[in-house]
Amino acid sequence: AIKVDLPKAASGSEQTKTTLALTIAKDGVVYLNGERTNDSGIVQYISGELPKNPDLQAIISADKVVPHGDVIHVIDLVKRSGVHRFALNVDPGK
């Protein structure tokens, strides 16, 4: 598991099924389903999975110290690759 300190949000307890889990660690490294990757790896994975699963969903987790622009970049990359259903993973807090 990749350790990230998720931001807290009261509305973050929804569960979403996914086959695309993206995590941005505090050092900026991006992981796809637990494996270190980069932009081209994400695009390649999506292009292989989307024809098999047109309802592909993504869950994006980012450590709370990751710059907002880095998170937006990953969201944009996922959307441009054809995945339009995604969620941001947060710690639901108390």
Image (cartoon, grey):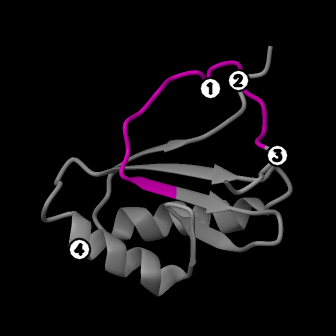
Assess whether mark 4 and mark 2 are in contact (beta carbons under 8 angstroms). no
Q: Estimate the spatial distance between the alpha carbons at disc 3 and disc 1, rounded to whole Å.
A: 14 Å
Earlier in the chain: of badge 4 and badge 1, it is 1
Which label belongs to residue 48? 4
| Residue located 34% across and 81% down the image | 44
Q: Give the residue number, with chain letter if any, for mark 2.
A: 92
Neighbours of disc 4 within 10 Å: few (<14), some (14-19), many (20+)? few
Q: Give the residue number, with chain letter if any, for mark 1.
A: 12
Position of residue 46 measured from the top left corner of the image (x, y, whole percent): 31, 69
| Residue located 56% across and 52% down the image | 60
| Residue located 56% across and 62% down the image | 34
> On the picture, is 92 further left or further right than 21?
right
Position of residue 77 measured from the top left corner of the image (x, y, whole percent): 46, 70
Q: Give the residue number, with chain letter if any, for mark 3.
A: 5
Assess whether mark 1 and mark 4 are in contact (beta carbons under 8 angstroms). no
Assess whether mark 1 and mark 2 are in contact (beta carbons under 8 angstroms). yes
Per the rendered image, the range of residues in magenta is 6-21
